[in-house]
Amino acid sequence: MIIGTAGHIDHGKTSLVHALTGIDTDRLKEEKERGISIELGYAYTPLPNGDVLGFVDVPGHERLIHTMVAGACGIDFALLVVAVDDGVMPQTREHLAILELLGITRGAVALTKIDRVCPERVHEVEAEVRNLLHHTALANAPIFSVNATAANDRGTAELRKHLHEAATEMRARGAEGLFRLAVDRVFTLPGHGTIVAGTVFSGRVRVGETVVVMPGNFPARVRSIHAQNRPSEYGVAGQRCALNLAGVEKSAVSRGDWLGDSRVLVSTSRVDARLRLLAHSKLSLASGATLHVHIGAAHVVAHLTVLDTECLEAGKSARAQLVFETAIGALPGDRFIIRDAQAAHTIGGGVVLDSVAPSRKRRSAQRLGYLDAVERMLAGEGLSQLLVDAPNGVSLADLERLTGHDAENLILPTSTLIRGTSQDPFAILESAWESLRADVLIALREFHAEFPDDAGPDSGRLRRMARPDLLTPLWTALIDELVHEGSVVRQGPWLQLPQHAATLSESDQELARQLLSLIGQGRPEPPWVRDLAVAVRQPEERVRQILRRQAASGALCQIVHDLFYDSDRVDTLAGVIASLAQQQGSVDAASYRDAIGLGRKRSIQILEFFDRVGYTRRVHDLHVLRKDSGWSRRQGPS
């Protein structure tokens, strides 16, 4: 268990920690000279069961609230300290509000300096504290009267016993999540190099493993670990750990950074969150407001956009987007504190909903519905609503980031399918997958009805017709499944329904072989239908029908009416487009004419064919390569 002190300046927090542990947490020269805490202090004491109890001692000065919040992030138990000669003071109230906003529900109160007042004053302050805590999560916290400077003080002994019992009874944090540590201290030791210390929020880390530093986004190998001030082979959630990082300069890491698993840590400058303003703040916040945000151990400036109301009033909550001036690391469920634009007062706090928030359509019904589902997930209702609201599924990588858990440990609804590629799998409800399948088959039927003589669309064109919003890994898996089971037939780059390809008679097959041969021999320009009909001594209409069937099978491509190219030739022509597009960014008729050695009219006809089948798209007088075309996967730029 990690205990964090809280309370007004000079109320005896550091002296109390010393009395409880025997350790003086004021380590700086200035702290010794001034008699106040300026930086975070740390102390550890063994428990009877062999565990170690950790203390984080925070400064109480109003100008050091940012340091206090950095120390309070990740603590399990609050020790609120009130000096009876002063009573409840401004930072007592502010620290208590911060503890509430951070979701800390377990704690105790120490009334210090009882040797300086009469017993009646102690009772008076105790009543004042009880009244202060009445409507908070610490309403039932025990209160101990202590004289931290006296040897063998009874109140201190009772408080120590209570803390030890609370630590023994506390259920350990689960270590099944992906590893994250909030950095609140960075230093060097001779012969060891850079040491990074902080609270492990989730998961575990072992000596020899590689972690990622965010928001810097660079890897670091863990050379050694101290957990709860003891050498250890691993660190787990709920412990304060110091990690010796190999090959990392001290200047590369700072307070507010995160160490963790690359699957769960992201560097972001934009988060969506549930924000709550304290009732006593007497403020209202509108979009555009500037705030100081304390998240993890970081202190950053952010600009506010309120999402589901015009203005956030004191005592109310709303969803909002925070846009940070510098990148941070965050995860859904992380709690944070907000202070006003002058960083003078704590005015509220919140919880992160999405650490990859969009800059556009952030107030759309679809987006707000997504945030509803995330809030339900964070409330313990699972992933069902997220998947119900996701007709195109959710990538397992996104679910890992949203939940902080490895994909193998996700609890998915029983009707969930895993689809996509091995490198980028998705979770999608079975009903949504069936809907995707139906959309593809409907789109193909409509295409064949409109273009009965075409072989069918290529994969990219079919996707734009059926589900243009579907991501590539899911689309690839969808088409592969339909082709594998025979619901869709693949002919070269073309996709078609099985019944679309008609069977030719023996005489038609023979005629088709002759025509294909003549077209193949007719490079650079094949014969027109009328010339082919003369060559094989058949009516033009019969030749035309045979050629259209060959086009439907993917053996030929119809460039314009009555002019067919064989597919190998079209592949070559597509490769020339890809090459020119790679060099120039786009293709014009003149450069394409020079590259293929044909006339301007024919070059334009070929370019218009590629526009028509979806390999390119026309932008004014230029033709731009589509990235999702069939040829780009079959052949690619040459």
Image (tube, rainbow, N blue to C red):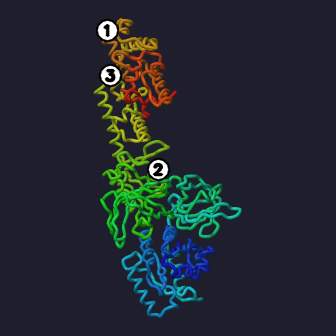
* Label 1–label 2 contact, CB within 8 A: no
- Is there CB contact under 8 Å for labels 3 and 1? no
Question: For numbered disc 1, what is the local secondary structure?
Answer: loop
Q: Residue at x 37, y 36 (%)?
A: 463
Q: Counting other residues with Cα less than 10 Å from the Cα at mark 3, is it few (<14), some (14-19), or many (20 or more)?
A: some
Q: Nearer the viewer, mark 1 or mark 2?
A: 2
Residue at left offset 54%, top offset 89%:
154
Which residue matches tag 2?
397
Extreme right residue here?
A: 191
Q: Amino acid at mark 1?
A: Pro
State the CA–CA distance, disc 1 to disc 2. Answer: 60 Å
Q: Secondary structure at mark 3?
A: loop
Task: Answer with mark 2 or mark 3, whichever residue precedes in sequence.
Answer: 2
Within-10-Å neighbours for mark 1: few <14, some 14–19, many 20+: few
Q: Nearer the viewer, residue 435 or 106?
A: 106
Q: Inspect the image, locate mark 2, and give the three-letter code of the amino acid beneath it.
A: Ala
Residue linked to disc 1: 539
If you read the primary sequence from the N terminus, does the residue marked by circle 1 or circle 2 appear first? 2
Left or right placement of residue 406 versus residue 430 in this view: right
